[in-house]
């Protein structure tokens, strides 16, 4: 066992005195812990608490989530991003109802087999809610172990991660896995932070190899950063007789099953205005023209930086027809003409939701 075992009782004592009062810690219900862990992926904790409380009010148990339609689940998730998490959560609830009689799975392997559940999430639920001796290694845990145990390989690459997971298993105190895993995560979030670790007040400093060696800033060892790809995209808000056209994306791919305004990438040498007219024709067969430019919205993702050119569009024929025309969809599974105030009821990708918020404060329909 690593010499770092000296820090385990110190860590557990710190956690007992300093852990945050989070709603899913009050009950240890496996369903609640599972939902919280899925939400916490790629999301800051203060936002998770708000969404968690609202989600649990709407879907208080597995049965309620399984019985809901996907649009309702996506709408409740709107704003958290990474919508595949919500779709997998919904699919997993239905599997629990079908294969486990509505009872949450009671083993690590059964939890791990649920859609969207990886080794970390399964370990977190198994240890925190089911009382099993399983590890749960996330980014906070990797960082703490890299510093305390001086892991000199990139912890987000296979070799370094394997070393961290082995250490976590060696250090795990039997019968206290839930507290141990949560303590590591909490300590990484509150004290052993990525860029501003609070080493001066760290209660584990005497057991930390990185602090002893003066290399806290060099741990964890980082992988080569990924390049950020810029994407230039055009989207159009087509209005006809007071109604707005929206379409539902195909199930596969980015933002599957979310609603959107049609659009796509701006091709080389093409203006944004020409791009949106072309994209609308290709995706709906509607002939359109630009009435006004609504906004330029920028939104960042893990490896992409999107610049979204947004336009107000009109039909170039049939403008006097009161009944909105039917599209020929090539990039969507469903479409609707809706009143502008109804847009709030549908789940949109973040960039389009920003556009809707921008439009709500303008006189764009006039």
Image (tube, rainbow, N blue to C red):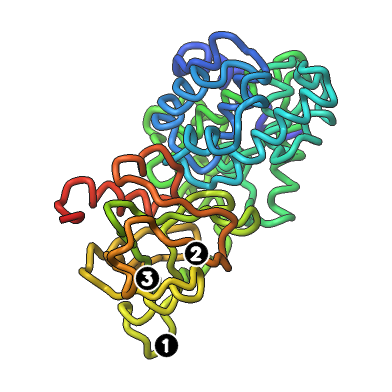
Q: Nearer the viewer, residue 3 or 257?
A: 257
Residue matched to label 1 = 268
Q: Position of residue 269 (x, y in %)?
A: 37, 90
Which residue appears at 60% of the width and 46% of the height? 84
* Mark 2 Cα shell of 10 Å, populated few (<14), some (14-19), many (≥20): some
* 113 sits left or right of 335 in the view: right
* 335 sits left or right of 357 in the view: right
Q: Nearer the viewer, residue 297 or 157?
A: 297
Is the residue 60 above or below the residue 212 in the image?
above
Which residue appears at 52% of the width and 12% of the height? 16
Q: Position of residue 22 (x, y in %)?
A: 47, 17
Is the residue 346 above or below the residue 225 in the image?
above
Q: Earlier in the sequence, mark 1 or mark 2?
A: 1
- Looking at the rendered image, the quarter that the N terminus falls into is top right
* 96 sits left or right of 58 in the view: right
Q: Earlier in the sequence, mark 2 or mark 3?
A: 3
Q: Position of residue 330 (x, y in %)?
A: 58, 68
**Under tag 2, what secondary structure?**
loop
- The tag on residue 284 is none
Residue matched to label 3 = 234
- The tag on residue 327 is 2
Residue 40 appears in the figure: no
Residue at far top of view: 27
| Image quadrant in which you'd find residue 39 | top right
Is the residue 56 above or below the residue 280 in the image?
above
Q: Nearer the viewer, mark 1 or mark 3?
A: 3
CA separation in Å, label 2 and label 3: 19 Å
CA separation in Å, label 1 and label 2: 27 Å
CA separation in Å, label 1 and label 3: 13 Å
* 209 sits left or right of 165 in the view: left
């Amino acid at each position: 066992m690593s010499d770092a075992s000296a820090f385990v009782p110190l860590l557990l004592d710190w956690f007992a005195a300093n852990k945050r009062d989070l709603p899913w810690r009050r009950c240890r219900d496996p369903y609640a812990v599972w939902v919280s862990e899925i939400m916490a992926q790629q999301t800051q904790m203060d936002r998770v608490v708000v969404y968690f409380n609202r989600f649990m009010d709407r879907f208080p148990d597995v049965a309620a989530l399984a019985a809901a339609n996907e649009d309702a689940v996506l709408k409740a998730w709107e704003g958290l991003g990474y919508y595949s998490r919500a779709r997998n959560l919904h699919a997993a609830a239905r599997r629990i109802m079908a294969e486990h009689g509505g009872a949450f799975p009671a083993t690590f392997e059964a939890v791990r087999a649920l859609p969207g559940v990886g080794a970390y999430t399964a370990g977190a639920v198994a240890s925190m809610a089911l009382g099993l001796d399983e590890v749960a290694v996330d980014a906070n845990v990797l960082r703490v172990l890299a510093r305390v145990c001086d892991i000199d390989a990139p912890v987000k690459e296979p070799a370094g991660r394997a070393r961290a997971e082995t250490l976590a298993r060696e250090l795990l105190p039997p019968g206290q896995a839930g507290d141990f895993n949560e303590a590591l995560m909490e300590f990484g979030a509150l004290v052993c932070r990525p860029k501003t670790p609070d080493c001066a007040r760290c209660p584990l400093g005497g057991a930390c190899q990185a602090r002893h060696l003066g290399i806290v800033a060099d741990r964890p060892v980082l992988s080569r950063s990924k390049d950020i790809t810029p994407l230039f995209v055009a989207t159009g808000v087509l209005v006809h007789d007071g109604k707005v056209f929206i379409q539902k994306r195909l199930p596969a791919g980015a933002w599957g099953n979310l609603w959107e305004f049609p659009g796509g990438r701006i091709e080389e040498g093409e203006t944004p205005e020409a791009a949106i007219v072309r994209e609308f024709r290709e995706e709906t067969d509607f002939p359109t023209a630009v009435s006004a430019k609504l906004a330029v919205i920028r939104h960042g993702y893990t490896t992409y930086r999107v610049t979204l050119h947004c336009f107000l569009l009109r039909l170039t024929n049939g403008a006097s027809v009161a009944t909105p025309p039917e599209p020929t969809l090539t990039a969507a599974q469903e479409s609707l003409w809706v009143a502008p105030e109804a847009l709030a009821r549908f789940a949109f990708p973040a960039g389009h939701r920003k556009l809707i918020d921008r439009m709500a404060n303008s006189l764009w329909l006039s």
